[in-house]
Image (tube, grey):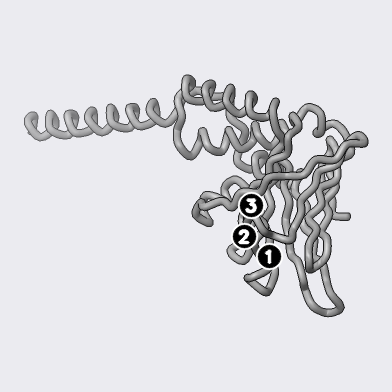
Amino acid sequence: MEVFLKIIFTVGLSLGMLACSTVETNNTGLPLMEESEIKQTIEQFSAHQQVYDGLYNAIDMTVTMRNSKVIRAQLAQRARQSQWDRTQFQLETANAEKKAKAETEIFLSFFTPDHKNDDLHKGKTAWKVYLEADGHRWEGKVTKLKFTLAELKAMYPKHNPFGTPYLISFPVGIESVEDKAAKFTVTGPLGAGVANFTSDGASPR
């Protein structure tokens, strides 16, 4: 009986130590947003618009401005998913802040029924993308993203499997844009889609 109790005690102690180890590994002590707040912040600065040609749905797009609030929310999401330690979190934050001082990024989830017209990232595309704020206008550089749907939805909840994911960078720091009324425009052979941004959120035209 005594041997049996010793075995139970040893197994229980081992499991307890394992549980403590797991908690310690996962709990990095980082001051991260709750997941619900992350999603709410990203959606606050996202706008959805559909452009019709008669009854024909020519463009369906969702636009998210990566302003300071969205960047912080996405850093928190990545930190939670990848279980960053404090050093990694600080490094990633510093890199994101440095990049935001040089350029403004906008995520575009873009759908048009005819796939041949979905070529915003190509050199000879007929599409143009612009960002306007405080009397200035900048033309964007478009990059097609190659992440999985799960990865994209974690960062941009309104993205869906039908949209093509693009990231568009503009040569202006986010500080010069995010506290002003800004307008994002995608214009091309099928029409123009517009999203408006303020410091409080986003809305379609």
What crowding class fits label 3: few (fewer than 14 Cα within 10 Å), some (14-19), or many (20 or more)? many
Q: Residue at x 88, y 34 (%)?
A: 180
Q: Residue at x 85, y 40 (%)?
A: 137
Report the Cα–Cα distance between label 1 and label 3. Answer: 11 Å
Q: Are marks 2 and 3 in contact (CB under 8 Å)?
A: yes
Q: Place residue 113 in its image quadrant.
A: bottom right
Counting from the top left corner in percent of width and height, residue 111 is at: 68, 65
Tell me the kind of residue under disc 3.
Answer: Tyr
Tell me the kind of residue under disc 1.
Answer: Phe
Q: Residue 111 carries which label?
A: 1
Q: Which residue reaches farthest right? A: 135
Q: Do the residues labelled 2 and 1 touch (CB within 8 Å)?
A: yes
Against 112, residue 197 (above or below) is above
Among the two numbered marks 2 and 1 on one chain, the one whose residue lies closer to the N terminus = 1
Residue labelled with disc 3: 166
Number of numbered discs visible in the structure rendering: 3
Among the two numbered marks 1 and 3 on one chain, the one whose residue lies closer to the N terminus = 1
What crowding class fits label 1: few (fewer than 14 Cα within 10 Å), some (14-19), or many (20 or more)? many
Instruction: Judge by depth and name the residue closer to the eye, 204 or 19.
Output: 204
